[in-house]
Amino acid sequence: MTEVKHENSVAGRLSAILGEINVAHRKSEISTRKPELIAVSKTKDADTISLALNAGHRIFGENRVQEAASKWPGLRERYDGIDLHLIGPLQSNKAADAVALFDVIQTVDRDKIARVLSTEMIKQGRPMPVYVQVNTGLEAQKAGINPQDVGEFVERCRSDYALSVRGLMCIPPIDENPGPHFALLRKLALSSGLPELSMGMSGDYVTAISFGATHVRVGSAIFGARLV
Ligand SMILES: *Cc1c(COP(=O)(O)O)cnc(C)c1O
């Protein structure tokens, strides 16, 4: 865990992390725009999320469609400019709800999902950027396209499904040094001409930025440990 000292409020932790992101970005030898902080609010209630919104933060991540549906429509009535990213696995029967609720889908990981998302975006008149999730560690239990298939899949997302693919996303294996996974994700993105990299969580976002992350997804370091 990155230590954030002397801060025990959501607003304080947010601002400390934004400061660390700035420092990490300045130190990074990879030139990208300043990384965006996606505040991961899964399991947190609307009141807790409001603390971050009141502090001026607007980019959030949720990993369940149903949970997001219970919190975000109400929050959008009270706050403008919210940018909500789906960062968890998506089932095709939830694609319509996902397109209605989210602004970015980061977990496109198979043809069927690419197809139903494309259909729903057209039907709802809500085109939105997507990321392809990559299973950099080739883990059996983890979602994502295998690294060697990324180029072809990204191409299909563009040509067959007319999706606006912005970048790649990964969740490295929990028990491994994440650096090589971040490096691999960047290499794959470069070879597909993709500008964005969603990688790095509470424990490794500084490392991810040194490998060129454009979006880091940070939950517990902002909102505190999750009980579930
Ligand atoms: C929960 C989650 C995060 C945030 O994890 P923390 O360790 O709490 O920062 C990031 N990305 C994904 C995909 C997640 O599910």
Image: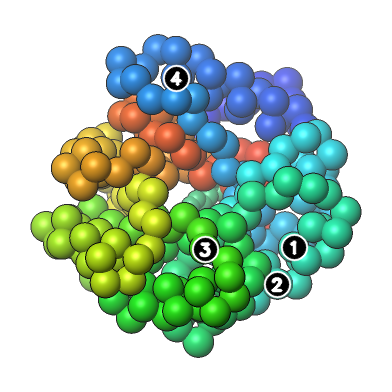
Please tell me whether mark 1 sits on a helix, a strand or a loop.
Answer: helix
Callout 2: few (<14), some (14-19), or many (20+) C-alpha neighbours within 10 Å? Answer: some
Give the amino acid type for the residue marked by disc 4 in the picture.
His
First-in-chain label (2 vs 3): 2
Q: Which residue is mark 3?
A: 127
Q: In x, y percent, where is residue 159?
A: 25, 65
Residue at horizontal 58 percent and vertical 70 percent from the top: 125
Residue at horizontal 27 percent and vertical 35 percent from the top: 179
First-in-chain label (4 vs 3): 4
Query: Horizontally, is 119 left or right of 37 in the view?
Result: left
Mark 4 → mark 1, Cα distance in angstroms: 30 Å
**Residue 69: assigned label:** 2
Query: Horizontally, is 49 left or right of 91 in the view?
Result: right
Is there CB contact under 8 Å for labels 4 and 1? no
Pick the front one: 92 or 6:
92
Is there CB contact under 8 Å for labels 2 and 1? yes
Q: Which residue is mark 4?
A: 25
Q: In x, y percent, where is residue 31?
A: 34, 20
Residue 126's place in the image compared with 178, above or below, is: below
Please tell me whether mark 2 sits on a helix, a strand or a loop.
Answer: helix
Colour pattern of the rendering: rainbow
Mark 2 → mark 3, Cα distance in angstroms: 19 Å
In the image, the residue with mark 1 has its CB under 8 Å from the nearest atom of ligand 1: no
Query: Horizontally, is 110 left or right of 12 in the view?
Result: left
Give the amino acid type for the residue marked by disc 1 in the picture.
Trp
First-in-chain label (2 vs 4): 4
Residue at horizontal 25 percent and vertical 59 percent from the top: 154
Is there CB contact under 8 Å for labels 3 and 1? no
Mark 4 → mark 3, Cα distance in angstroms: 30 Å
Q: Which residue is mark 1?
A: 72
Mark 3 → mark 1, Cα distance in angstroms: 19 Å
Q: In x, y percent, where is residue 67?
A: 67, 71
